[in-house]
Image (tube, helix red, strand yellow):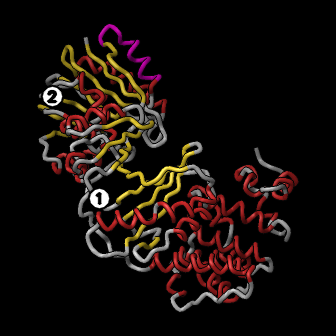
């Protein structure tokens, strides 16, 4: 519901008003409120918040002309100039670079300059700051602004300086790790680790803890997406995180990176916060506390990530080695929209493993880039692999991926609703259209009905279908309608990119 001007004014002038106001509701009245000197900074604060979402960036670029931005950057009020600089940095319009640089060169208020420096860096104008030196503080009150300016300048210069990349030499034996996997499929990863001679323990939803004996052994498990190394768990408010990391993480971190990486320091890292905090402030505090001759904080060119996650009252700091070689899914030469992550596909196969058959002939009627078929073949030996997709581009990518995986698979461009199998298959494995990011529910109603009618013709008697979809209710309805020709053997839910798809194992009668 659209907000009236009076309602917007009341909210903007309330405590923490800009942080609370509903952007979409107030969208149409915000431009007119820029005319009020007492509201201009608050309106810009709302737009800064909006500009962090890509959905609003184009709308804001259309709403605020370059001439408007130039005027706001020169506004008499320091808070307006500060927020205008932040907004310019988020919109990243090249035409804002010249007026932003002019505003910075004329700026006399210390608290505004850090935002202007960061914005210049975001607009690709960091080279204009090559000779700039931060003036010394004229008073104790200015000291904190000087420090913020120095940190902003360091951030911009680091981002523009080419970093020396480091290869991972080796992982120390006995290093503790947490493997990120699909939620509710953790036991599938534990089973894979057991087969590789490793002992995994479910630590939390989507997390399996393991002690490394060798990274090579870990690569035998395919159903983990990411590996993190926990450095420290503690309880403290966010404003103390920087001091704690500087005291308790920094020494061990530098020592570990020396062991892990080839080549000489410095090691470039980024900070990733997964917590409900003021990200800018907390990130700056952590970066300041981690100042060390062997470390460089870089937001765009780095080998290492420090991830800080907050879970309830506890906070854990993790190390992620971004250059750690992982060849498990190197066959992925291309993908299509809504492709399943290969680690998720591997987890699906591991979970459904008790129902799969060695040497099976396998059909994927909605194969996309071929990931489900390839991960099925990686799980256990297969006979014929056959993929169908209505998209010519998807089939081209699937063929390339299968060739890179060293598999002899056949793919055809066809609407699966018109496909008739010359010989029946042992298994149908498919990531069906979700209707969320590709297609829609109405299309799926018709598609799923045809697919379930076709399953008894595609599968041998006693054949198995493993189906992965967000259309959980629709799939259950089809299983009920076809109860004379098929039976549900197993069902679970998992997660993928914020969604919670279901996995179904069905046997034809």
Whole-percent x, y for residue 469 in the image: 40, 31
On the image, the x and y values in percent for residue 419 come to: 25, 28
Q: Which mark is residue 324?
A: 1
Q: Identify whether 160 is placed above or below 451.
A: below
Q: Quadrant of residue 119?
A: bottom right
Is 483 contained in the magenta span?
Answer: yes
In-front residue for pair 230/278: 230
Q: Secondary structure at mark 1?
A: loop
User: Is 274 placed above or below 193 here?
Assistant: below
Picture quarter containing residue 67? bottom right
Query: Which disc, if any, is residue 229?
Result: none
Q: Can residue 200 be found in the magenta stretch? A: no
* For residue 75, above or below residue 461: below
Marks 2/1: CA distance? 35 Å
Q: Is residue 13 left or right of residue 214?
A: right
| Picture quarter with the C terminus | top left
Q: Is residue 365 visible?
A: no
Q: Could you tell me residue 470's position as x and y percent?
A: 44, 31
Q: Residue at x 61, y 87 (%)?
A: 134
Q: Position of residue 478 (x, y in %)?
A: 40, 18
* Contact, mark 2 vs mark 1 (Cβ under 8 Å): no
Q: Which residues are magenta?
A: 473-486
Q: Which residue is mark 2?
A: 361
Q: Say whether residue 138 is left or right of residue 374.
A: right
Taking the image as shown, residue 272 lies to the left or right of residue 462, namely right
Badge 2 local density, few (<14 within 10 Å), some, or many (20+)?
some
Q: Nearer the viewer, residue 18 or 332?
A: 18
Which residue shows up at 37% across the image and 45% down it?
178
Lateral position of residue 97 relative to residue 345, left or right: right
């Amino acid at each position: 519901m659209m907000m009236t001007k009076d309602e917007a004014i009341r909210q903007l002038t309330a405590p923490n008003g800009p942080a609370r106001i509903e952007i979409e509701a107030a969208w149409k009245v915000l431009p007119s409120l820029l005319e009020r000197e007492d509201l201009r900074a608050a309106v810009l604060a709302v737009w800064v918040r909006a500009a962090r979402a890509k959905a609003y960036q184009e709308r804001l670029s259309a709403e605020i002309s370059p001439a408007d931005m130039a005027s706001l950057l020169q506004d008499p009020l320091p808070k307006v100039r500060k927020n205008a600089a932040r907004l310019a940095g988020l919109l990243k319009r090249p035409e804002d670079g010249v007026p932003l640089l002019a505003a910075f060169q004329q700026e006399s208020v210390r608290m505004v300059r850090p935002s202007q420096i960061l914005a210049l860096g975001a607009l690709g104008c960091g080279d204009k700051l090559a000779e700039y030196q931060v003036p010394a503080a004229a008073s104790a009150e200015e000291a904190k602004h000087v420090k913020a300016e120095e940190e902003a300048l360091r951030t911009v210069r680091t981002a523009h300086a080419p970093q020396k990349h480091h290869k991972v030499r080796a992982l120390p034996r006995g290093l503790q790790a947490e493997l990120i996997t699909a939620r509710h499929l953790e036991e599938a990863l534990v089973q894979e680790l057991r087969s590789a001679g490793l002992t995994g323990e479910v630590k939390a939803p989507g997390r399996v803890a393991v002690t490394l004996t060798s990274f090579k052994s870990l690569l035998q498990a395919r159903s983990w997406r990411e590996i993190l190394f926990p450095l420290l768990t503690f309880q403290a408010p966010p404003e103390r995180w920087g001091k704690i990391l500087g005291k308790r993480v920094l020494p061990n971190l530098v020592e570990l990176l020396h062991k892990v990486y080839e080549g000489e320091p410095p090691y470039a890292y980024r900070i990733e916060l997964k917590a409900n905090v003021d990200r800018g402030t907390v990130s700056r505090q952590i970066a300041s506390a981690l100042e060390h001759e062997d470390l460089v904080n870089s937001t765009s060119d780095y080998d290492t990530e420090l991830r800080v996650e907050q879970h309830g009252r506890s906070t854990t700091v993790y190390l992620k080695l971004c250059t750690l070689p992982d060849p498990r899914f190197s066959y992925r030469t291309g993908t299509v929209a809504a492709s399943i992550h290969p680690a998720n596909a591997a987890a699906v196969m591991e979970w459904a493993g008790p129902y799969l058959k060695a040497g099976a002939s396998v059909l994927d009627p909605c194969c996309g880039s071929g990931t489900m078929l390839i991960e099925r073949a990686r799980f256990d030996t297969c006979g014929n692999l056959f993929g169908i997709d209505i998209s010519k581009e998807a089939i081209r990518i699937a063929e390339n991926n299968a060739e890179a995986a060293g598999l002899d698979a056949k793919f055809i461009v066809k609407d699966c609703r018109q496909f008739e199998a010359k010989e029946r298959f042992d298994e149908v494995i498919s990531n069906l259209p979700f209707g969320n990011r590709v297609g829609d529910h109405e299309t799926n109603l018709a598609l799923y009905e045809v697919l379930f009618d076709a399953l008894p013709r595609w599968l041998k008697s006693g054949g198995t279908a493993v189906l992965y979809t967000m259309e959980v209710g629709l799939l259950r309805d089809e299983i009920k309608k076809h109860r004379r020709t098929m039976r549900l053997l197993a069902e679970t839910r998992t997660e993928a990119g914020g969604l919670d798809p279901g996995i179904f194992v069905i046997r034809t009668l």
